[in-house]
Amino acid sequence: MSSLRLLTLNLQHCLPARGSGDAGRAPDAARVAALAQEVGALAPDVVLLQEVDRRQARSGGVDQAAVLAETMGMRYRFAASVAGSVTGVRLPVRRSDTARGYGVALLTRLPVTTWHVRHLRGSGLRRRPSAPWHSVRGWTWDPTRVLLAAVLRTETGPLTVAVTHLSTAPDVARRQLVRSVTSVGALPGPHVLGGDLNLDPAAVATTVDLDLLAHAPTFTNARPRTQLDHLLGSAGVVPAGPGTAHHLSVSDHAGLSVDVRLVGLEKGARMSAGQ
């Protein structure tokens, strides 16, 4: 294997991007199918997705990760951070692979040895200095997030790739990032951790000891000014080229890809299997 192409994308449940011909329309099966063509054209080997809907009314009841994986001929796993409806009563996540929910997904062309899931505690009800869309009178609910990892088989040995979507509160996101890196580091290495971390590159670099594999502004998709989406690598994962931002037809985030080479693979301990 000369190189491996990684792609991370916050889907925003396939909401058409601002400035696109479909802006303002609700996402549906046709939009997911169109996105699969766009992503497939980038030829990724591993795709890390966040803000993924599974059978939600707001996105046409589509199992978005399943449709994307099937269209691109990839293996996949979905892990919920929210069970049931995202617009109604939110149920406790008893199974990460719930039949209906919202969360993250990982798609891969490589064989998967094991899947692993960890939940990342949020701070619950908290007061924010600036009120985001989901706040009421300055109070906001900071929910539990989820970390999904796969141990992949490569020609040179095991590789662990993990995806997550961290809190919008920087202090909470930092704690969740540290826990994510610790959990992923217990799996066979080397390791890649990616997703919408809601932290800029400087904050990531001062929080964990992983290499930033790709540098490009990803937020917003229409007017990229900062990088919230990241692909991080441990020793043994080396960029084979510059990172690239992809301004696709969905989401308020751009996608981010990078080609990497795997060197000096070593086996590590194993995190206990998730749900």
Image (cartoon, rainbow, N blue to C red):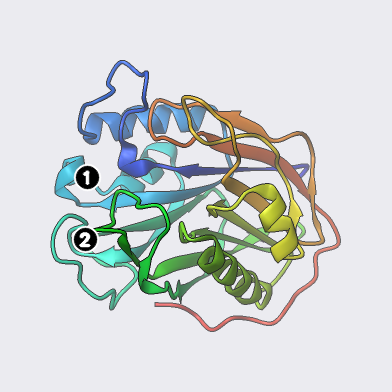
Tell me which numbered mark, 1 or 2, is placed earlier along the sequence: 1
Q: Residue 98 at x, y = what percent?
A: 26, 67
Question: Which residue is more in the foreground, 255 or 96?
Answer: 255
Q: Residues within 10 Å of mark 1 (few under 14, many from 20)?
A: many
Q: Disc number at residue 35?
A: none
Q: Residues within 10 Å of mark 2 (few under 14, many from 20)?
A: some
Give the amino acid at mark 2: Arg
Tell me whether circle 1 and circle 2 mark residues in contact (CB < 8 Å): no
Q: Quadrant of residue 188?
A: bottom right
Cα separation between marks 1 and 2: 10 Å
Residue matched to label 2: 100
Which dot marks residue 62? 1
Q: In x, y percent, where is residue 102? A: 30, 57
Is 235 left or right of 68, judged from the image as shown?
right
Quarter of the image holding residue 194? bottom right
* Farthest-out residue, top: 21
Provide the secondary structure element on which disc 2 rests: loop
Q: Nearer the viewer, residue 218 or 60?
A: 218
Q: Residue at x 32, y 67 (%)?
A: 97
Q: Position of residue 154 (x, y in %)?
A: 68, 57
**Residue drawn at the location 52% of the way across and 58% of the way down:** 163
Q: Amino acid at mark 1?
A: Val
Which part of the image, by quadrant, shows the C terminus?
A: bottom left
Decide if residue 126 is on the left or right side of residue 262: left
Q: Secondary structure at mark 1?
A: loop
Write the residue at 19% across / 50% down: 56
Report the front residue among 253 and 29.
253
Residue 129 point in image, percent of width and height: 42, 57
Can residue 155 be seen in the rendering of this structure? no
